[in-house]
Image (spheres, rainbow, N blue to C red):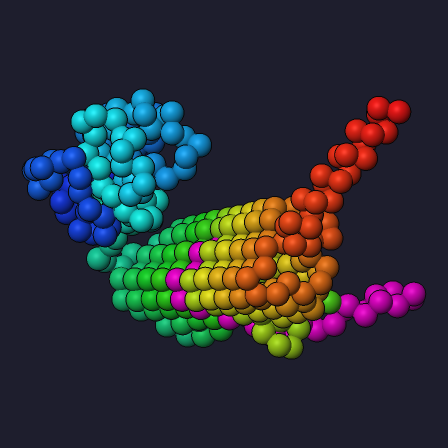
């Protein structure tokens, strides 16, 4: 249920088509090919012409009272569905919902190039076909931009930067000393390639160390608003394919992040730390420098990581430790406090 001032009204889709697209199985709807939904909506707001999803048992009561005409749902929840609701059964309801929502609300597309007369584009820059260069954009010398890119207003693309095809750069971004892959989404206010925080400490005055590396960003990377990624000091800062980086994240120089890692808002990663594939850092995690976070490791929100984290490990707290150890400590401390109060 989107605001038409900001989002184009979707074209109705049949349940049969959405099920095929999302890998779901239709149940409780014998005429799926002729059952159309014209929008998506949360459970508590959905009406009979809307598609929703249910994948968190916390919202079971909301699901039971929902008026949604159709809903993505896990196989073990089918028997709880309200009468008359068409079901799209999926092992991963949220993923299936995302695919269906993309079908109803595809990303804006364009077929003609547009370069604002207020943009500055250096004569040596190479820009691919069907690109939009918006108002007050600055594109420096020897920049290379692939096909079907969109550079939004007031962004700066510094000398020598390369950007792959089908990449969107949001408003007020500054890009320097970087190579960005294809299919990326760089949201508003992102700063990539500025000098890292490197200096030699001296009692007579700290000496800045020249930051001579780059930022190398893979394909299909999402970088949230106002995130900053420092260029390397000599080695490069590297972000792997498919990473999802939230808003207000700080990534220091020489950091290496593997493919499909997830970095949630307000995380700070100190220089030269390596984060392997599929790792997840929840909100406000702080990571000290020169550490290694193993493949698939998961770090709980507000944890402080002071030592290496093994692959597949789940850690929590400050200093970060295995979650079970942290919870035992919390329970033990609670018991001690209770005993003290009883004295």
Q: Residue at the location (34% across, 31% down)?
A: 42
Give the position of the N terminus as an image quadrant.
Answer: top left
Assign the magenta stretch its main secondary structure.
Answer: loop
Residue 304 at what x, y percent from top left?
Answer: 70, 52
Q: Is residue 5 magenta?
A: no
Can residue 173 be seen in the rendering of this structure? no
Q: Nearer the viewer, residue 9 or 292?
A: 292
| Residue 88 percent location from the top left of the image | 22, 41
Q: Quadrant of residue 144?
A: bottom left
Q: Quarter of the image containing the C terminus? A: top right
**160 to 326, vertically: above or below:** below
Q: Position of residue 50 (x, y in %)?
A: 23, 31
The residue positioned 27% from the left and 66% from the top of the image is 129
Left or right: residue 168 versus residue 245 is left
Determine the residue located farthest toward the right in the rendered image: 203
Highlighted magenta segment, given as a residue range: 199-223
**Residue 99 can be seen, yes or no:** yes
Does residue 207 belong to the magenta stretch?
yes
Quick check: 134 above or below 295?
Answer: above
x, y (%) of residue 282? 57, 49
Q: On the picture, is 257 further left or further right than 206?
A: left
Q: Residue 84, relative to residue 271: is it above or below?
A: above
Decide which of 131, 104 is in the foreground and name it: 104
User: Residue at the location (27% across, 40% down)?
Assistant: 72
């Amino acid at each position: 249920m989107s605001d038409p001032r900001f989002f184009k009204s979707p074209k109705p889709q049949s349940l049969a088509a959405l099920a095929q697209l999302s890998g779901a199985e239709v149940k409780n709807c014998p005429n799926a090919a002729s059952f159309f939904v014209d929008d998506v909506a949360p459970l508590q707001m959905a009406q009979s012409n809307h598609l929703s999803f249910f994948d968190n048992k916390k919202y079971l009561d909301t699901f039971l009272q929902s008026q949604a005409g159709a809903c993505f749902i896990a196989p073990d929840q089918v028997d709880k569905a309200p009468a008359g609701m068409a079901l799209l059964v999926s092992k991963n309801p949220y993923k299936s919902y995302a695919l269906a929502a993309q079908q109803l609300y595809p990303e804006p597309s364009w077929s003609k190039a547009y370069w604002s007369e207020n943009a500055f584009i250096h004569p040596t820059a190479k820009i691919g076909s069907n690109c939009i260069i918006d108002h007050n954009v600055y594109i420096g010398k020897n920049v290379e931009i692939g096909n079907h890119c969109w550079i939004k207003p007031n962004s700066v693309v510094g000398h020598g930067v390369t950007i792959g095809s089908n990449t969107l750069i949001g408003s007020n971004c500054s890009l320097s000393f970087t190579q960005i892959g294809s299919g990326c989404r760089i949201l508003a206010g992102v700063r990539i390639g500025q000098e890292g925080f490197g200096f030699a400490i001296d009692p007579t005055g700290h000496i800045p160390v020249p930051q001579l590396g780059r930022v190398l960003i893979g394909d299909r990377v999402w970088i949230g608003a106002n995130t900053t990624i420092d260029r390397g000091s000599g080695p490069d800062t590297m972000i792997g394919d498919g990473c999802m980086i939230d808003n207000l994240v700080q990534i220091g120089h020489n950091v290496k992040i593997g493919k499909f890692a997830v970095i949630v808002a307000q995380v700070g990663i100190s220089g030269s730390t390596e984060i392997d594939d599929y790792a997840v850092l929840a909100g406000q995690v702080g990571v000290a420098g020169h550490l290694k976070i193993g493949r698939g490791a998961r770090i709980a929100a507000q944890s402080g990581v002071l030592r290496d984290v093994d692959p597949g490990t789940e850690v929590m707290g400050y200093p970060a430790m295995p979650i079970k150890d942290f919870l035992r400590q919390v329970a033990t401390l609670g018991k001690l406090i209770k005993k003290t109060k009883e004295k």
